[in-house]
Image: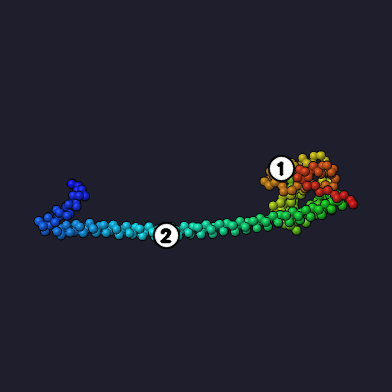
Amino acid sequence: MKTFSDEELIDLFNRQLPDLLDRRPDLEPLIYQGFLGAFARREEVAVVLTELRALRTEMDQRFEQVDQRFEQADRRFEQFREEVNQRFEQVDARIDAFREEVNQRFDEVFQALDRLGSRWGIRNESVFRRTMAALLEESFGAAVEERVIKGEQFDVVIVAPDQHILVEIAASVGASIQERLERKRRLYTEATGVAPTRILLATADIYSYRAQALREAGIEVIEPAEAD
């Protein structure tokens, strides 16, 4: 099929087409329909292009609206996260205050028992355990019990919220006391999966240097107060 150049097409339309129509008037409807179809298609393309431009503008506007909504959502999420963090901080502060109060109350109880022990020498473990149970179970909801773990006697075990306290009761203690208490700490942790929060030794007779060594190892020592 022959391809016409631009110049040939211009010459065809300007000179040869009028001559053709003079010679063949019957071709005029056919040629007219051909031109009409060509121009109609161009107009349709123009309409489609216009619609595409309008669609693109609309999509740009919608994307901009979506971006604005995402920004608003990000601001709301950030505000929500800040509020949640503030509430968690408030809860943590309340938990810390509760723990501090419980520890303070426990210290007050142990001080009272210290004064009590100085009077009767902490020789009756059963009475001591019942006293602890009466004070702690009724006042603080703590469980107070005696346990035996792998043949090792645990005189008093206090279990309270966030608190596992071991209390060793002895009329007097010797050089092996620290080793024994460390072994009980390890046995209790292995048996329960919870490391004791505190370990206390209640005794009526202990050398001051030995008591100091226990305190430096993280073991609390309750001993009779010196007489005024």
Q: Residue at x 68, y 47 (%)?
A: 194
Crowd class of label 1 (few under 14; some 14 to 19; many from 20; radius 10 Å): some
Q: Position of residue 97 (x, y in %)?
A: 70, 56
Q: State the image coordinates of residue 174 (x, y, percent, origin top left).
A: 82, 41
Q: The disc labelled 2 sits on which kind of residue?
A: Gln
Q: Name the N-terminal-most of marks 2 and 1.
A: 2
Q: Position of residue 60 (x, y in %)?
A: 41, 58
Circle 2/circle 1 CB separation < 8 Å: no
Q: Amino acid at mark 1?
A: Arg
Q: Secondary structure at mark 1?
A: helix
Q: Is residue 153 visible?
A: no
Q: Residue at x 45, y 60 (%)?
A: 65
Q: Viewer-proximal residue, 152 or 213?
A: 213
**Residue at point 63% right, 56% down?**
88
Could you tell me how many numbered marks the image carries?
A: 2
Q: Disc 1 marks which residue?
A: 186
137 left or right of 171 in image: left
Q: Which residue is mark 2?
A: 61
Foreground pick, 176 / 130: 176
Q: Is 195 in front, or is 147?
A: 195
Q: Is residue 205 above or below residue 130?
A: above
Mark 2: few/some/many CA within 10 Å (<14, 14-19, 20+): few
Q: CA distance from mark 2 to mark 1?
A: 68 Å
Q: Is residue 37 above or below residue 123?
A: below
Mark 2 lies on a secondary structure that is helix
Q: Residue 120: x and y, percent?
A: 86, 51
Q: Is residue 43 visible?
A: yes
Identify which residue is drawn at 81% across, 43% down. Answer: 212
Select label 2 or label 1 by which is in front. 2
* Above or below, comparing residue 141 to residue 179 in the picture: below
The answer to whether 205 appears left or right of 44 in the picture is: right
